[in-house]
Amino acid sequence: MTAVLRDTWVIARRDLTHWRQQPWGVVINTLFPVMIALMFGGLFGGAIGEGYFDYLMPGMFALTMFFGVEATMTAVSSDAQKGVTDRFRSLPMSSGGVVAGRCLADMMGSVLGLVVMAIAGMLLGWGWHNGMLQALAAFALLLWLRFALLWVGIFLGLTVKGPESVSMVQILVWPIGFLSGIFVDPATMPSWLGVIAQWNPLSATAAAARDLFGNPGAITGSREIILAIAWPLLLTAVFLPLSVRKYRSLGG
Amino acid sequence: MYGMTRVAISARGVSKTYAGAEQAALNGFDLEVPQGTVCGLLGPNGAGKTTAVRVLSTLMRLDSGTATVAGFDVMKQGAQVRKNIGLVGQYAAVDEILSGRQNLVMFGRLNGLRYRDADKRATELLERFSLADTGSKPAAKYSGGMRRRLDLAASLIIAPPVLFVDEPTTGLDVQARQEVWLAIRELVAGGTTVLLTTQYLEEADQLAGHIAMLWHGRVVSEGTPEELKQMVGGDWIDLTFASPELAERAIPAVRPLAQGDLHAEPARISIPVAERTKAMLAIAGALSAEGIEPEEISLRRPTLDEVFLEISKKQEVAA
Ligand SMILES: Nc1ncnc2c1ncn2[C@@H]1O[C@H](COP(=O)(O)OP(=O)(O)O)[C@@H](O)[C@H]1O
Ligand SMILES: [Mg+2]
């Protein structure tokens, strides 16, 4: 057990070293969602009205978690393609350590991203109105979503071949992000789009976060919170075993 | 076959077909490498070298047959196998953002060393592979040869009894190739058992005491480099003529000078020869005595594909 913990930490530390070696990469990755928030806040804020940031920010938090899929996928596929994964697999170390290290590093990255976004949000007029405890619960739900998306990212990273497929997934991130309750209330969308958006896992987490933070647009009711717990659970239940299988069968 | 020496690597009838592939990548692959020796697995692109290495290093499951490394079954005792091997894959597998030293410390830690020991080992290895000066630069800034040496160093952290090295110099320039050869020779002097794959007869000759020739997933011939070089034969001299008629007339003149069968194509003759310079002069002499002037005379080594074709032809005849 201690061996697995040590391996996990060594692998996670590798990412921390990456951050230190390439600090600009971290800065750009964490500021990118802030830029998106500013852009959409500025674009739609006028049309939608006062307090749009108060509505938008929980959605942006969910989107930040969603961007994590890309980060995980890129890291995993680059390791697989460069043979680093094979080297790990040929070492007398647990495969659990490799995966857990990846999880730990990506979760740390996402916590950082979330903190930066929250600070940016507060500067723009967003805040939580239901007390600290509920706010923490909201952040926990957001990280829970990120945890589930980790497995999606690992699976995709082990599946895609080459940079072309990586950029295809990067492009797909956008329609999935837009077809959700992140930017606007699904109720205002054309009916069929609204239905898709409503069932988008991102919408559930965004809505639950809005609810817990007490931001406008919150649909008070426990349905959103249950969905925000259930969706990531389902994603994890599907993609965790898929990722493990893929990892074990790498190279046939 | 090897008397009393212990066998470090053994494969018997190993077969492996990739999902969706029509042909088997390994097809009844047999190999035995005695402890403390270097075996060169020589074969052209696509012969199955990488597949063999991946199966033996437990990265990939075999479909049928058995294989042991350091006495452990690769299918049933993967964890023990991994404790006894180092792997240098076909592509240098190092973290490019980390420095050489950071790479070695990380792999040392993952090999179970404590930080302090891993750091000490990294210093030793950087020194040994002449990377001490560049140890703190990110690996992305390394030249191909340096990266290969770092890769070698990374697989030697725990001084494994068995080392797999897959095409260590493919894509490297002459200078880098020499550096890598030097590094591998040092290892061998330390008593490690090495299975080295290569597309170059010269490389196998330089580094290995025993060469197994791999062709379509099977070892088709084995022996010392000397034995194989004999089998491969000497150089070939190619003659090109202005017309097929000229070539026709030249054949009887040069036939007595050929060591074996010459190959004739329209307007072109290939002659196997033993001593290159003497043969070249003799052929030129014989042609000018007949008053035939070729357009071009060139000397070349047989390609690996020719060698393998020749060997499989001989085997068909023998069978
Ligand atoms: N991942 C793969 N999927 C399908 N076929 C493969 C794969 N890798 C290698 N092959 C095929 O298996 C054969 C042996 O390949 P390989 O072991 O890489 O040869 P070598 O290393 O000698 O060049 C080749 O015909 C190659 O095309
Ligand atoms: Mg290969």
Image (cartoon, rainbow, N blue to C red):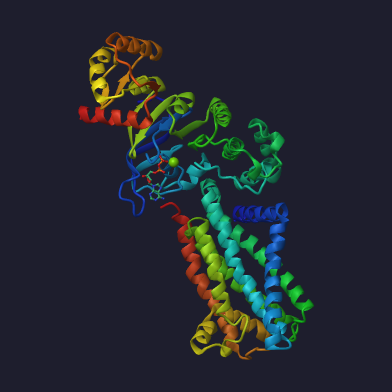
Quadrant hosting residue B139: top right
Does residue A112 sit above or below A195 in this rendering?
above
Quadrant hosting residue B258: top left
Does residue B9 sit above or below A188 in this rendering?
above
Q: Is residue A148 left or right of residue B310?
A: right
Q: Which residue is drawn at 70% across and 84% down?
A: A45
Viewer-proximal residue, B294 or A133? B294
Does residue A119 sit above or below B229 in this rendering?
below
Viewer-proximal residue, A233 or A214? A214
Viewer-proximal residue, A2 or B190? B190
Does residue A137 sit above or below B172 in this rendering?
below
Where does the image place residue A104, in percent across and percent down from the top left? 63, 61
| Ligand 1 in which quarter | top left
Where does the image place residue A250, in percent across and percent down from the top left? 45, 54
Answer whether residue A215 is visible to the viewer in this image: no
Quadrant hosting residue B297: top left
Q: Residue at x 56, y 45 (%)?
A: B93
Q: Residue at x 59, y 85 (%)?
A: A224
Q: Residue at x 65, y 31 (%)?
A: B128
Quarter occupied by the N terminus of chain A: bottom right
Q: Is residue B52 left or right of residue A119?
A: left
Answer whether residue B74 is visible to the viewer in this image: yes
